[in-house]
Image: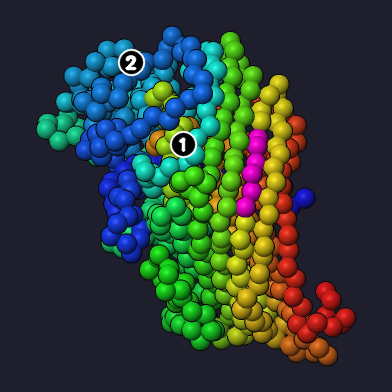
């Protein structure tokens, strides 16, 4: 069984208003949680947010839960930091009289979190929080719903890998007194992982750095489709000896940047020495309308113990086009590296608000590169397209996880070339999309997911010393469904392999020349 790429526990960060990533002027405006969310954005989001009807909703809240209604949040919530751990209230907020350490803050449509500290600063009060298991906030619950995804109120978010929570220090807080203007909240606190910098551009793409790579990512709503575009390029001067002194146009390698590209073209230029580039673009179909992808859930809690947590993903379908380049210049004779899984921290989020509880569907990316280039001017290039569809279900009950589903994929290799003096090869894996279901607006915990992974590989024998130089190209389509192992309410038991299940896999293989000698 293949091991799926995994996304980290997701923490959606803070917000400003930007237009959707699209060339069309008719596209809806998307809330972006990349630079800090202030009162105006909070008020707009809460006023426009719509509740999703539940088949069943019967909840007994823990006595420690302090609820903030939609109207109260509109009137008194001033800001939320990027990691979703700090909430700034006006001092006249009635909720502050009930808040203290260890209480559970429930803000309609935004958060359910444990209070760590409450500190008054001038005209404002800062409430610092940490994640709380759902079964600590709800002592008894029977929640059931089944809903098509609707991006009417979708927003763009960023996330980071959370650290174990520790006691906060005074450095978490701003010590100055505030007059009329509220303070600027830090992106995250000392007890959390750093929020990765994410910069929105004027063209509504998002740029940043993931490990050794620079990336650009864009999402755009197009009718009943969600278009996505990821462009990745290995960073220069990252300690691997890449001088970055010059760039080379990818057109020299017969790679054309698509005119339909949403992002601004990071893929179109590569560094002259060590050059690794990746582009994945495509769409999810049926995000709204009669054939919309659907998410259903059943949550049953009795005496603060989870009896059932079930998620059902229906009608996932779409297309992804993959294009990848790797080459050496004149300065290096070899380059070998197994890059770890890169988590692109920019996600497309669809709120699913059930009686104020902030559930969310989240769509994101992951990618992985393993590469070995031997010989100056070694160059590998491949491209292909995969159409995919699938359904999946994950369920936690009686301390055990079960996953099931079905899917299909049709990988089709397109352009391909390989030239290397020595044996060279690579594996490029892109997890797109990964559709997760979780809870939280600015700090979502993903409970379960369904994904599609496209894997392209090249193995090329040496041009020097070989009687016949052989190249083997593959493109595979694989789908998984699973539970997020770091979601705090679930006391997982058993091997980690049980957390995820492969529900479909298909591979296309092309060997050049197609002879027995090249059947690697």
430, above or below 287, in the image:
below
Residue drawn where x is 57% and y is 67% of the image: 322
- Report the quarter where the C terminus lies: bottom right
- Note whether 433 is above or below 417 in the view shown: above
SS of the residue at dot 1?
A: strand
The x, y position of residue 515, in whole percent, is 84, 83
Q: Main secondary structure of the magenta part?
A: strand
Find the distance from the CA under tag 1 to the CA under tag 2: 26 Å
Q: Which segment is the magenta one? A: 389-394
SS for callout 2 = loop
For disc 2, the marked residue is: 99
Q: Which residue is mark 1?
A: 360
Q: Is residue 171 visible?
A: no
**Rendered image quadrant of residue 113:** top left
Residue 457 visible in this rendered orientation of the protein = yes
Residue located 41% across and 45% down the image:
151
User: Magenta span has 390?
Assistant: yes
Is 144 in front, or is 109? Answer: 144
Q: Is residue 243 left or right of residue 392?
A: left
Q: From the viewer's perspective, is the residue at label 1 or at label 2 nearer?
A: 1
Where's residue 86, x and y in %? 34, 31
User: Residue at coordinates 49% horizontally, 19% vertically from top-left?
Assistant: 57
296 up-or-down from 432: above or below: above
Q: Which of the two residues, 62 or 282, is positioned nearer the viewer here?
A: 282
Q: Residue furthest right?
A: 516
Find residue 259 and name its label.
none
């Amino acid at each position: 069984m293949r091991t799926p790429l995994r996304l980290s526990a997701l923490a959606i960060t803070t917000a400003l208003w930007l237009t959707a990533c699209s060339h069309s002027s008719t596209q809806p405006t998307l809330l972006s949680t990349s630079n800090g969310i202030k009162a105006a954005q909070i008020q707009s989001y809460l006023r426009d947010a719509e509740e999703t009807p539940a088949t069943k909703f019967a909840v007994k809240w823990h006595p420690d839960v302090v609820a903030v209604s939609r109207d109260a949040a509109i009137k008194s919530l001033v800001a939320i930091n990027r990691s979703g751990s700090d909430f700034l209230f006006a001092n006249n907020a009635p909720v502050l009289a009930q808040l203290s350490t260890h209480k559970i803050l429930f803000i309609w449509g935004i958060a359910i979190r444990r209070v760590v500290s409450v500190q008054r600063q001038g005209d404002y009060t800062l409430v610092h929080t940490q994640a709380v298991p759902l079964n600590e906030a709800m002592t008894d619950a029977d929640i059931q719903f089944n809903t098509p995804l609707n991006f009417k109120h979708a927003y763009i978010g960023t996330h980071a890998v959370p650290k174990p929570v520790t006691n906060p220090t005074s450095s978490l807080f701003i010590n100055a007194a505030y007059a009329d203007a509220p303070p600027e909240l830090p992106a995250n606190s000392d007890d959390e992982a750093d929020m990765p910098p994410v910069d929105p551009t004027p063209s509504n793409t998002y740029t940043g750095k993931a490990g050794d790579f620079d990336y650009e990512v864009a999402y755009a709503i197009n009718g009943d489709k969600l278009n996505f575009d990821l462009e990745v390029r290995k960073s220069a001067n990252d300690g691997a000896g890449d001088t970055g002194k010059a760039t080379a146009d990818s057109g020299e390698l017969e790679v054309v940047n698509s005119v339909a590209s949403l992002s601004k073209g990071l893929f179109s230029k590569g560094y002259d020495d060590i050059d690794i580039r990746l582009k994945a673009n495509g769409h999810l179909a049926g995000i709204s309308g009669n054939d919309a992808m659907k998410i259903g859930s059943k949550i049953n809690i009795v005496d603060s113990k989870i009896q059932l947590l079930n998620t059902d993903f229906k009608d996932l379908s779409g297309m992804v086009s993959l294009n990848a380049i790797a080459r050496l210049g004149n300065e290096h004779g070899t380059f070998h590296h197994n890059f770890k899984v890169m988590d692109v921290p920019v996600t497309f989020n669809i709120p699913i608000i059930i009686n104020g509880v902030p559930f969310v569907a989240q769509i994101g990316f992951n990618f992985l590169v393993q590469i070995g280039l031997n010989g100056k001017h070694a160059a590998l290039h491949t491209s292909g397209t995969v159409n995919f569809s699938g359904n999946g279900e994950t369920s936690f009950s009686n301390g055990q996880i079960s996953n099931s589903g079905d899917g299909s994929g049709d990988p089709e290799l397109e352009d391909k070339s390989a030239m290397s003096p020595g044996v060279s090869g690579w594996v490029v894996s892109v997890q797109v999309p990964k559709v997760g279901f979780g809870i939280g607006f600015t700090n979502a915990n993903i409970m379960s997911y369904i994904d599609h992974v496209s894997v392209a590989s090249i193995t090329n024998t040496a041009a020097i010393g070989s009687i016949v130089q052989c190249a083997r190209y593959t493109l595979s389509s694989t789908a998984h469904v699973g539970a997020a192992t770091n979601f705090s309410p679930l006391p997982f038991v058993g091997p980690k392999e049980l957390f995820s299940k492969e529900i479909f896999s298909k591979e296309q293989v092309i060997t050049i020349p197609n002879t027995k000698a090249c059947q690697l």
